[in-house]
Amino acid sequence: MSEITAPRRALICGVSGQDGAYLAKFLLDKGYEVWGTSRDAQMNVFAGLQTLGVRDQIKTLSMSPVDFRNVLQVISEIRPHEIYNLGGQSSVGLSFEQPLETMESIAFATLNLLEAIRFVDSSIRFYNAGSSECFGDTGGSPADESTPFHPKSPYAVAKAAATWHVSVYRESYGIFACTGMLFNHESPLRPERFVTKKIVAAACRIAQGSAEKLMLGNIDIRRDWGWAPEYVEAMWRMLNINIPEDFVIATGITQSLRDFIATVFAEAGLDWRDHVVSDPSLRRLSDPLQICANPGKARKLLAWEPSCLGPEVARKMYKAECKQPIPID
Amino acid sequence: MSQPRKVALITGVTGQDGAYLAEFLINKGYIVHGIKRRASSFNTARIDHLYRDPHEDGVRFFLHHGDLTDSSSLIRIIQQVQPDEIYNLAAQSHVAVSFEEPEYTANSDALGALRVLEAIRILGLQKKTRFYQASTSELFGLVQEIPQKETTPFYPRSPYAVAKLYAYWITVNYREAYGMYACNGILFNHESPIRGETFVTRKITRALARIKLGLQECLYLGNMNSLRDWGHAKDYVEMQWLMLQQDKPEDFVIATGVQYSVRDFVNAAAKELSMNIRWEGKDADEVGYLDTQTPRAIVRVDPRYFRPTEVETLLGDASKAKNKLGWTPKITFEELVSEMVREDLKSAERDELVNRHGYKSMDYNE
């Protein structure tokens, strides 16, 4: 059997999340043999994979990324060509409640995976899910790969540490390891504790007759929201160029949360001002007001160009929430 | 009418900085509590001179067993001590070792700082207790500008530096998120006669003193061209204390602003011992010969000490500390080297004496 015909094997850590599910589907379509891990694969229903209709084609297994023995064993057995590290505590708000677990599940997990790669086969390519949160408040100037970090939550500090671990292992040991600093990327698979999903879910219920009020924190924050199914392709592209580098992945378009809300409610035929209440208790302890991005490097070196931009993200999420058919990718 | 004494808690009190800081604070009138790790062998040599039997009157220095990897030990000690100031100096502080033990380094250096900050919050002491985090010039790693100051972006080059980067930012975050008086001292290299024996400066002064007395043949070093900004630990602990006495918490770079290579340090130490070293060769083949009638090689390069990623140059700009706090280092590079050599020569002489009388002296190996 020739090397060329043998399928490439990918291991996705954190396959039960939004990005894990979309990436699994994307890699399957590319002809990969896809393995996915979750902390307890037996108990997990992998709703995301099911929604995308690929649950049966993904081989899943349990792995706790903070347990080095476990990580080593999984990587030795699967012998993947590519590892995507998407697991870990993913809520900024929760990281103030669970700072220690946040650090362990993000930075220690990354460190264990890098050490296991060094040990098993240092030709394995490694993608690390970084975060735009590392930049903190970028003010008016868009963040790119050379922008210094100023993390503003325990989540962001942990992601910053993980990003630098990747950098140290790339430079010290020549491992093909890189971090994608993805700005907000949304989809119907977002859990409801994310504000975008919370908004579309409430708008949907209100459109169907609910009299509830939607309570939100600071709606003046500005973010760069993109469409998750497009972002997972950037992850794959990062591992399939010649030189490992870190990339900012974003649309380059920043809007306020107020804009996002207005688009969703307009889509529902409603005026958001009748239904939304700003609740100061939902404000975070320190939250960047404005985050904007310059994805020029990804456009140039990865030939990656997102097509779902600005208000289109809000509209697509709303349509999906109200069970109107949308194309999966 | 006397004010109640201030209470300080020092993690890492058995280390170089811990020992100097404890002594400094006791002299300032503080009650000082220190945390030390459990160990089967004694690990308090640097602070034994400060220790008094707790049964005596007026004792102001106390030790507790605890560990930065053990949250409950920290909470218990902080609850008991109710400190006005906490100095978090404990860490796996060796860059080279961090490549071998990256997870332990992250656990003690990164999460250790978080555990202390959390302990302060859990005990409701965030308005009372001030927090000092020992940050490091290694954060600058692959330097983004020369010299480095508070606004220079970080570029860590080792698991040690990455762990310290986490500790730096989590300290900033707790200050911003919870209004805690928490700050970072970004200290450039600081040495002393009680610097750990595995750090390059102490390794040099010990080895040359022993070579001088015929107790050792040769000194093996890594990258001889590394440039560092070396100060005296005694000067630097004063700054740690000053940072916690201000109206509002801020981060400061602490450095001398003068840079020397590892080779310069060897030459300076040799000069103190009236030894003259002649250098030949380059890189891994560089050899330092003792310039006598029959020259012999006393310094060689062992590539084993090269790091997977080297930090070539570090040079600090401590203008902010000078302008805002009036701090300047008092001890010069020559005085530092001279003191270190003098102390190591004393131990070498003791070993030599012991050997001469037929007893074996301890031979400490890395």
Image: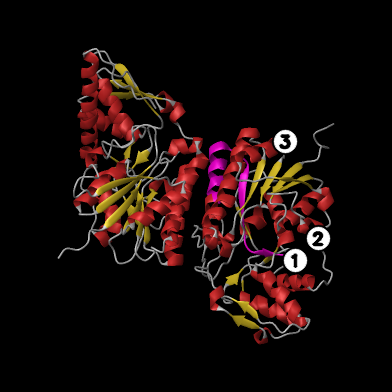
Q: How many marks are shown on the rendered structure?
A: 3
Residue wearing tag 1: A188
- Reading the image, the residue beneath label 3 is A77
Question: Residue furthest toward the left?
Answer: B1
Question: Percent from the top left, x then y, of residue A197?
Answer: 69, 70
Mark earlier in primary sequence (3, 2):
2
Does the magenta segment cover residue A166? yes
Could you tell me residue A61's position as x and y percent?
Answer: 74, 45
Answer yes or no: are tags 3 and 1 on the same subunit.
yes
In the rendered image of this protein, does residue A95 appear above or below residue A60?
below
Q: Chain of mark 2?
A: A
Does residue A270 lie above or below B318 as drawn?
below
- On what subunit does the disc labeled 3 rest? A
- Residue type indicated by callout 1: Pro
For the N terminus of chain A, the quadrant is top right
- Read off the chain for label 1: A
Residue drawn at point x = 31 percent, y = 30 percent: B204
Q: Report the side of B85 relative to A160 (left or right).
A: left
Q: Is residue B309 visible?
A: no
Task: Kindly state the secondary structure of the residue where label 2 is placed.
Answer: helix
Give me the C-alpha separation between circle 3 and circle 2: 28 Å
State the residue at coordinates (83%, 49%). A57
For marks 1 and 2, the one nearer the N-term is: 2
Dot 3 and dot 1 residues touching (CB under 8 Å): no
Of labels 3 and 1, earlier in sequence is 3
- At horizontal 82% and vertical 71% (from top left) the residue drawn is A323
Determine if the magenta segment contains residue A170: yes
Does residue B112 sit above or below A190 in this rendering? above
* Cα–Cα span, label 3 and label 1: 33 Å
Q: Which residue is mark 2?
A: A51
Instruction: Point out the stretch of residues depicted in magenta.
Output: A162-187
Callout 1–callout 2 Cβ contact below 8 Å:
yes
